[in-house]
Structure formats: structure tokens, C-alpha cells
Image (cartoon, rainbow, N blue to C red):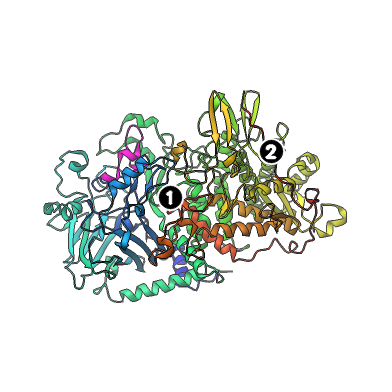
Amino acid sequence: MSTPLPTDAESRRLHESGSRTQNWQRWGPYLAERQWGTVREDYSADGEAWGYFTHEQSRSRAYRWGEDGLLGVTDRECRLCFALAMWNGRDPILKERLFGLAGPEGNHGEDVKECYYYLDSTPTHSYMKALYKYPQGAFPYAQLIEENRRRTKAEPEFELADTGIFDESRYFDVVTEYAKAGPDDLLIRLTIANRGPEAAAIHLLPTLWFRNSWSWGCTHEGCEVKPRLEAAGPAAVVARHVSLGEFRLDVEQPTGAEPVELVFTENETDAQQAFAVDDGKRYVKDAFHRYLIEGETAAINPQRHGTKTAAIYRFNIPAGEQVVVRLRLAAASEVTEQPFAGFDELFALRIREADEFYASKIPDSSNAEEANVARQAYAGLLWSKQFYHYVVKDWLAGDPDQPAPPTVRQFGRNHDWPHLFNRDVISMPDAWEYPWYAAWDLAFHMIPMATVDPEFAKGQLELFLREWYLHPNGQMPAYEWALSDVNPPVHAWACWRVYKMTAPRGERDVAFLKRVFTKLLLNFTWWVNRKDVAGNHLFAGGFLGLDNIGVFDRSKPLPGGGRLEQADGTAWMAFYASTMLAMALELAQFDNTYEDIASKFFEHFIHIADAMNTLGGMGLWHEDDGFYYDQLKVEDSVTSLGIRSIVGIIPLFAVEVLEQVDIDRLPGFRKRMEWFIKHRPDLGRHIAYCEKSHAGVEDDEEHQHNFTGHRLLAIPSCERLKRVLAYLLDETEFLAPHGIRALSQFHREHPFILWAEGQEHRVDYTPGESITGIFGGNSNWRGPIWFPINFLIIEALERYYHFYGDSVSIPCPTGSGRMLNLFEASQELRRRLSSLFLPDAAGRRPCHGVEERYANDPHWRDLPLFYEYFHGDDGRGLGASHQTGWTALVATILSDLHTPRTAGHAQRNRPAQTSAHEQNGRLAQPQHGYKQTQPR
């Protein structure tokens, strides 16, 4: 049965792109927002990437591995780039890229100091829209650097708006829009509005250039002969590239303003400016800055050719008025004699098509504010796709035509990843703050991505399992700063989730599931062999993406030579095993050779869960507190680290509901599972494994007719689940007005303190920015709200509900007397998380804190920002400000709020079951006291 073709225009373009009949995704927002200060551009001996290639140098030095620009576009191999540049007549430098603080400059690490917003994008980038707010006064570069350097970690960051630069609305709104007439025909519309009280001048320089692939002497793929840009009349440029072909940029002459001026130079390093060396080159990368701001007419090529060009527009815009600039970049085969005929009509069509596409993705029941938040979350997600180029072998060795890098690099950062060859468009966490992939971030990105572009989502998940990414030992690359760092193993979950999201049952992409499953086997084996040090099914893992969550830096040696048995590391592995079990059972429906693998993962899960609950008596479970804790082992001494953090919540994620009808079709797996049930009844003491789901009763012959066909595999028993949830949903502990905190606020008044080797190790509740220097101090897991963990909590509650239905209800919030089933509790968390971005009655969005502009100014108030994490008390945004990225999960959360769900045909009308745990009409309350001990 063939799948019917999609009916809306954007979905048809996606289909054509996926079937490779039309290359609609050749061009997109793949140009980085920041290339300077990255590891791949760092050739230093000490690995100080921020200092080796600075923002100050970025206008003069050619990049080796990529390009950056302001709200720009490029092709998927970053050969030809287009972006904005501008000058207000007062700035000391030409504004060609976003400014921000380097890691050592900020009081909380690197931080962009600009105001810009991704407003819209379709998945094929047939329409895109973004906004940049450009001050009319001199940009306060020095003030931002000096004041943030002066501030301590206990103080808030000093932002651009804090300088007063936007007072009296003295700024320009610069709106950038792109619309595709065809796969290689890009219409560009720039709208510059003066929001200030007086007329103001602006120089606008739409810029076209080739990435420098010719200066290095390299021989790998992508190193090509020098391309060429040349004028084709007063308002057109022809671009010729050996692999891209020939393109033409048409520039519309402005009405009522000075004629446009085309200027040319080379995208090559200004050695005199960057290194105080005269290499004889006359036309270099910073020529337009020197020409426009310093008046150096000899900086541009009078022959009107080169590898970098700009069209200079000079406007004086009256107060409250705007101007529009139109350009068109098209392949030579698609160039028309009248490039601007039907221009605005095509934009109107693409906008209508974008509206039609998102109308099919955002539920009709969403209100206008919810729809706006979802639309901008998807826009940020799609704008954060970036061309990423990093070939470790060549990066270590250096290039033939450049000075040899220090030999110490052969033993330094990433030297043990010589196979890594990255040259792809990849979803980035944040296009400025994190312009490099992070493997565990990407897994979460692909959940909302699967809604709008399922093929790209599957392709990204496969990419990281390909042999030029995955290490030969099975480890996935973490991120460029340390490819060998260990992040939570969530890739399998994302693959499984995307597999189920992207098609109804019976029509799913089984071939995709087989491909990723095979490679995930290698990764799972790496985890088992490398992170279960003692062979007892309790895992370490180290960093695990949670930065300063623990009392120790978990990537470094522990006091006294101790070993940390991590509740989260162990739970992540149980989660991994249960996900691989579900995948294997699915594949076994089509190929019974997967039955044996399913049995293997079933046993893995059982042993991990058993160790977590019982090893050494109670495992990592603390019976008095009713919570899971890390344990520190030093020789024969074992210390339970009584920190109530999400480390003890993560064990709840390891839950899978098995369908009996599927099990019955797999006799080999069923036989092995039943052997375990019969011969290992001890495992049932603390694990909800293979419990049968009935109408509120346990398994016995009398009630066999009530069996609903579900079996539960989970780390906590029902009783332990309720005890942990009592903490989770307690507003004096984890439950915040806008989600689940990473650390219980119990530790506000009761910090965890442990002495080891004469040194105090301490964990305090810190709801905002980090006040410690662990992992650079630019993120904090000791109190704020993080979307990825909250999302997994919500999903886990739904899976528990799928099994327990209405037979389990809990007070939410704890102590309130308001009883909810687990699905209703998950919806409550969705509502709290989504409230971060939705305006209250006064127009305030919690994510914006107390900034008045976002509540009262019509030019600011519809612009939510999707931060990296959020304050645990008031919800204001913290960390990276454009983390779409995993915070784009809010689009999925908003959609799920409007999507009716049930636990299954037998779940909805169950009579309530009263357990001994609830016989007094309430859940047993968690015990807040614990003894803090120190290792011997």
C-alpha cells in the first residue's frame, strides 16, 4: 500500500527532498553564529581556544573549518555564504557577527551580548524569518567586557539592555526574511525599522563570500581550487565555484536613497592586522571595515572581483519609518531577466504555506500565545542547524601551507579520535554559545524535530552512529572540547522515540530501527565494559552531562582513591537496557533472530535493577529517606551521599511496559522470561518486573479474565515509586512553580556537607547561576529547572500510568489533598513548564524575569527566549539564551497538553486500589533527616 502524497506545499517539498527528486534543503541557515573561539579553529599548544582565536581577530583572520555571520545562510557544504553586516556611523567596528564574551571573560562563562530572535522557518527553509535589534548608539563592547569581568559568580550577568543602549527605543529592528522560488533560487528581503524618536543613519551591507578552502594546502574532501566573485554590472555579482556551479546575486537599487555600491575583496587573513606580518596581500577579509569606517579606499579591489563582496546601502531613516532592501541569489540556470518581478507575491505565498504547514503541526485547540511560542520554538530549532566541519587527523597534523602546530597537540585534546571526520549539517544546542554538537543534547533536539522533519531527525540520529563518528571501541563523540567525555546514554531512547513518532504502527521505518540498533549494540557494550568497574552492575560514568550535580567533580579522581557508584549512571544504564529490550522486541516481530538479543537485554535490565535495589543490602536505595543516592566507596567503607537531587529521580526513567500479545508471538523470549519469573522470585522484592496489569488487583487465577495485556519492567516497586514521587511533587522539595528543580530546595536550609582528606565538600541549593567554578561555572544543576530531565520525568509518569492506570493516585502537590493519577500528574508538569514562556495577566513571561520591555513594549513582548535552563524559584531564563536546542521540547510539551491520551482500553475505568502504603488516606511522607558521614 503506497503512502498518499502530502497535500500542503511544504510537506510536498519535504517529500521531494526526502526522495531526492528536488534538493530543497541544499540551502539553509547552516552558517554558524560564531566560529571564533572554537576548538576546531584552535592550533595552540595549551588548548586555550578562547584566547587563540578571539572576537577581535575574527574580522581579520580567515577561518580554517567554517564561517560565521549575522542571520545568514549557506549551502549544506558551506561553500557560498550570505549574511548581513551593518554600521550605524558610531560603532568602532563593522557589525558582521554577533558579539559575546569569551569563556574566561564572563562571570558565568561565555555569553552572547546581543538581542536577536528566530521568528519562523519551515523545515525545507522555503521561508525563514529572524530579527536583530541593532543599537543606534556606539555598541558598548568595552563596558560589557569590563563590567562582567568585575562581577563575581554570586552576581547576575551584565546584559546589553543593562547598559541603557536601548533606552528611548534608540535602535533599529532589522528583519531578515528568505523565501525560495526553487531549490537554488533564494529571495532575500531585509526590512530596517527605526524605532527611535529621531531620524537615524545606517549603512547596510548584505555580504556574499566563499568559505576559504584554498589557503591551506589540504587534500581532504572540500579542499578545492579558489573560486571567484565578479561584478556583472552595477547591481549584480556572478559567483563561480568548481563544485557548486555558477550563481548570480541581484541587488535592487534603492528608491530615494544613494545608489548601491558593490565592493570586493578576498576572504583571506589580514596578516598585518592579525600577526603584525606583511605578507604582501592587498585585499583581505577586513577590507569593508577599513573602507567604510577608516576611510581606506585602497582596501577594496577596483577591478571588482574577489572571494568576498558586499552591496553598500546608505540610509537615513526617519523616526518610526522603515526601508526595505531586496536581493536574489539564484543558480545561473534559474536567473530571470526581471529578478524582482513577483518578488513580494512569492513571499506572501511562502508565508501562507508556512502557516498551512504549522496549522497541521500545532493543535487547533492551542490559543494564540501557545501557538506563537511553539512556532518560535520550531523556528529556533530549525535555525540552529549548522554546517560543522572537523577532521581530527588533519587538525592535529596541521596544513601543508601553514606553520606546523606544536607537537604537544599529538598527545593533547582529542588525539585519540583520529578517525573522526565531521562535515555535515548538524543540529546545534545554541548557534552562538554552543556552536558545536553535543551528543546528548542532540538526542532531545530530535523529538520536536521529528514532528516537523522526520527524515532529518532520523538522519541525525544515524549520523552519530556512523563509523566516521562512532569510535572503534563503540563510544559516541561527546563534543569538540572533549570528544571522550561521557554523557547520559539517551541516544537509543531518542531513536526509539523518533521511530514511533514518525509513522503509525504498521507503517514504521523498520530498516531505520535495524540500522541504529546494530550500532547501538556496540555503544552499549562499550558502556558495560568501561563503566561497570567492579563488574557488579553498578555504574560510574563520571560527568554524565550534569556538571556540578554532585558533591565531587565526577570526572576527576575522588578523595582517598575512592570509587563513586552513581545512582544516575546505574539508572541510565537500566534505562538504556530497557529501551534496547523494547527495540529488540519490536524487531523480533519481523525477524525472530532478535529474540535472543531481547532476552539478553531483559537479563541486563534485571541484574542492573537488582543491584541498584539490593546489592550490599539496600543497593543505592536509602530506606529511611525513601530515595536513591550515590555511594562513595573507599576500601571497605561505604558512604551514602544523602543529596536529594535528580540523581535520585533518574531511576524512575527505567520503566518499560511490555505487551503480552507481542511476547506471545516470541516463544523463545517468552520461555526465557518465564524461567526468570519462576527461578528468580527474589527479584520481585523491589522491582516491578513482569507484574501483570489487572483491574486493580494482583495476578491470581481468579482474576485472569481481567488481564489487560501489560507487563511492567521498572527499577522501583510501586511503593518505592510513590515514595520518590512524594519528594518530586513536594513544593518544599523539587516541585517549582515552573517545573522540577535539579536539586531539592530542602538543601537551602540543610546543605549537604562531607569532609574528606581535611577538605570540606558542600552542596547548597542554588536556584540560579552557578556560584562555583566546577566545569567552568557556566551552568548549574544545583537547583534550576532543565527541560531534558523534566521531559523524561513526564514520559516516565506516562509509562507508569499506562500500566497502573487509575489504580495509583498521588497527592499533587504533596500534602495538598488533591489526588491525581500519574497521567494527570504528567499534565500538571507540562502546564508548569509551558508557563515559563506564556504571559501572565500583566503580560510578563517568567523566562524574561523582570525586564519591562518584554511585558509592555509592542516591539518586544511577542519575543520569548528559549534559555538553556531556568531559575528554580522564579523561572527566569539562565545560561545560553537561544537553546533550541533542547528547550524546543516546549513545542512538544504544548502539543501534548492538547492531545488526549489514555492508558489503554482497560485502564480508564478501574476501581481504585488501596495499598497498605495509602491506608491512612495519604501517602507516607518522606523523612527529611539523614546522617551525614565521612569516608574513612
x, y (%) of residue 918?
78, 51
Q: Residue 903: say if magenta.
A: no
Looking at the image, residue 71 lies above or below residue 628: below
Say left or right for 2 vs 625.
Answer: left
Question: Mark 1, residues whose alpha carbon is within 10 Å: few (<14), some, or many (≥20)?
Answer: many
Q: Which residue is mark 2?
A: 621
Question: Mark 2, residues whose alpha carbon is within 10 Å: few (<14), some, or many (≥20)?
Answer: many
Q: In the structure shown, which secondary structural element does the residue marked by tag 1 occupy?
A: loop
Q: Earlier in the sequence, mark 1 or mark 2?
A: 2
x, y (%) of residue 757?
55, 23
Q: Nearer the viewer, residue 249 or 882?
A: 882
Asked if one can make out residue 374 in the rendered structure from this viewpoint, the answer is yes
Looking at the image, residue 487 lies above or below residue 822: above
Q: Which residues are magenta?
A: 37-57
Q: Residue 41: say if magenta.
A: yes
- Which disc is residue 880 wearing? 1
Asked if one can make out residue 465 in the rendered structure from this viewpoint, the answer is no
Q: Nearer the viewer, residue 905 or 776?
A: 776
x, y (%) of residue 777?
45, 40
Q: Amino acid at mark 2?
A: Trp
- Which disc is residue 685 wearing? none
